[in-house]
Amino acid sequence: MPEREERFHVETTVFDDAVCVRVVGAVDIATVAAFRAALWAAPARPELRVDLSEVRVLSAAGVRTLVAARLWVRAQGGQLVLTDPPPVVERVLRATGLRRVIPVVGSCTERVLAGV
């Protein structure tokens, strides 16, 4: 049986105190422009959460976008938070040192319900 191909897409959910950007598929050179556009289009809130739970690949282009997004969000007085990375993405975050500068937590919904 052929493996189901997940098409890249981004969904944005706006809460009172945060915006959650859910990313599905591979974040690579072919999709990074759409990923970047979704992050920059997110409404201003104290926290921008990027749900990585359905990301299959996070390339160097994706890492650079997350670094730029962190700087952009901080310049606006907010915080970038990554949520629920799968093991393959977690390895990239650790290897690049991104895990040390961007908080990584459970799912977007859990944080909103807990008021965190």
Image: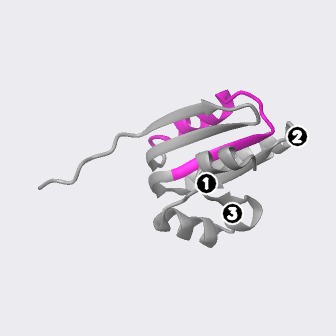
User: Where's residue 78, x and y in %?
Assistant: 82, 42
Q: Is residue 73 above or below residue 62?
A: above
Q: Within the magenta stretch, is there residue 38?
A: yes
Q: Which residue is mark 3?
A: 98
Residue count near mark 2 (Cα–Cα under 10 Å), binned few <14, some 14–19, many ≥20: few
For the point 49% across and 54% down, the residue is 53
Q: Which residue is mark 2?
A: 77
Q: Which disc number belongs to residue 83?
A: 1
Q: Amino acid at mark 1?
A: Thr
* Secondary structure category for the residue under label 1: strand
* Secondary structure category for the residue under label 2: loop
Q: Earlier in the sequence, mark 2 or mark 1?
A: 2
Q: Can you say which quadrant of the picture contains the N terminus?
A: bottom left
For the point 72% across and 59% down, the residue is 103
Q: Which disc number belongs to residue 10?
A: none
Closer to viewer: mark 1 or mark 3:
1
User: Where's residue 22, x and y in %?
Assistant: 53, 42
Q: Earlier in the sequence, mark 1 or mark 3?
A: 1
